[in-house]
Image (spheres, rainbow, N blue to C red):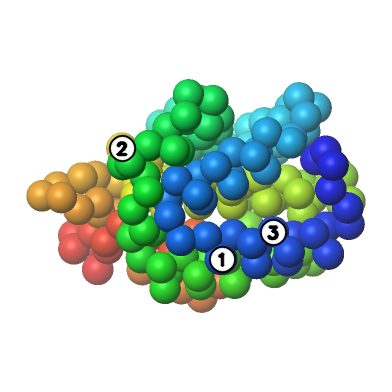
């Protein structure tokens, strides 16, 4: 992560700045500026961590989940930077307010502890480089914030499969997810901040 100081000081500051943003365009531009500071080496490490965690999943679920996990990360990363470069974050369509400010603020309040926690209960582990672990975890949250609060999309892309034959889907103007309300005890989980609704077929 280029151009920033100690994670325990910088990440709370970043979360505070993010929390003060009010429009989707302002948030998108802020997220793109931060994501653009990650070096190619950082991205390679993050990709390795993502691949490692997917490889721990059982077959055949592992290979069904893999393309959606990659879209969740790299598809959104490239879309975020593309929108910044082509000026999309300055367009009228994204000058509207963030759709759910209360949930967005709760996400920002969670973010420092989610990145700096010693007990790694997150979806991705960064054990190989503890000093960089908070910054790599931040990358994950930056992309989730882009998806959920700039694009108004669920944390996991539409089509993402879950055990039991469930998947994230869109119907009648709403997104639905089988695990939306199932991870409340995991306080750092993005499920708690996701705009999707709980799939009524998996209550």
Near-viewer residue (74 or 83): 83
Considering only order in the chain, which callout, 1 or 2, is on the residue closer to the N terminus?
A: 1
Q: Residues within 10 Å of mark 1 (few under 14, many from 20)?
A: some
Q: Nearer the viewer, mark 2 or mark 1?
A: 1
Q: Name the residue: 69% across, 59% down.
A: 14
- State left or right for residue 197 relative to residue 120: left
Considering only order in the chain, which callout, 2 or 3, is on the residue closer to the N terminus?
A: 3
Q: Secondary structure at mark 1?
A: helix
Q: Identify the residue position indicated by label 1 in the image.
A: 19
- State left or right for residue 82 relative to residue 33: left
Check contact, mark 3 vs mark 1: CB within 8 A: no
Q: Kindly report the distance in space between the C-alpha atoms of the residues bearing marks 3 and 2.
A: 32 Å
Q: Name the residue: 59% across, 47% down.
A: 30
Q: Identify the residue position indicated by label 3 in the image.
A: 14
Q: Kindly report the distance in space between the C-alpha atoms of the residues bearing marks 3 and 1.
A: 9 Å
Q: Residues within 10 Å of mark 2 (few under 14, many from 20)?
A: some
Q: In which quarter of the view is residue 186 placed?
A: bottom right
Q: In which quarter of the view is residue 35 placed?
A: top right
Q: Name the residue: 18% across, 63% down.
A: 200
Q: Position of residue 79 (x, y in %)?
A: 48, 29
Q: Is residue 28 above or below residue 115?
A: above
Can the viewer see residue 39 in this picture? yes
Check contact, mark 3 vs mark 2: CB within 8 A: no
Q: Identify the residue position indicated by label 2 in the image.
A: 159
Q: Position of residue 139 (x, y in %)?
A: 65, 45
Q: Is residue 189 above or below residue 65?
A: below
Determine which of the numbered discs, if any, sits on residue 88 in the image.
Answer: none
The quarter in which the N terminus is drawn is top right
């Amino acid at each position: 992560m280029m151009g920033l100081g100690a994670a325990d000081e910088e990440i709370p500051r970043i979360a505070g700045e993010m929390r003060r943003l009010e429009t989707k365009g302002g948030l998108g531009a802020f997220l793109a500026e931060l994501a653009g500071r990650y070096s190619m080496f950082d991205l390679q490490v993050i990709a390795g961590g993502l691949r490692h965690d997917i490889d721990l999943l059982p077959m055949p679920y592992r290979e069904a989940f893999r393309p959606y996990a990659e879209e969740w990360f790299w598809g959104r990363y490239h879309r975020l930077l593309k929108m910044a470069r082509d000026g999309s974050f300055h367009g009228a369509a994204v000058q509207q307010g963030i759709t759910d400010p209360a949930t967005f603020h709760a996400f920002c309040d969670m973010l420092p502890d989610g990145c700096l926690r010693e007990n790694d209960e997150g979806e991705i582990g960064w054990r190989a480089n503890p000093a960089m672990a908070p910054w790599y975890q931040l990358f994950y949250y930056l992309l989730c914030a882009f998806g959920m609060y700039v694009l108004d999309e669920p944390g996991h892309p539409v089509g993402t499969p879950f055990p039991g034959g469930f998947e994230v889907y869109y119907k009648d103007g709403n997104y639905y997810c089988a695990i939306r309300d199932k991870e409340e005890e995991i306080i750092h989980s993005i499920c708690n901040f996701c705009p999707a609704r709980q799939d009524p077929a998996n209550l």
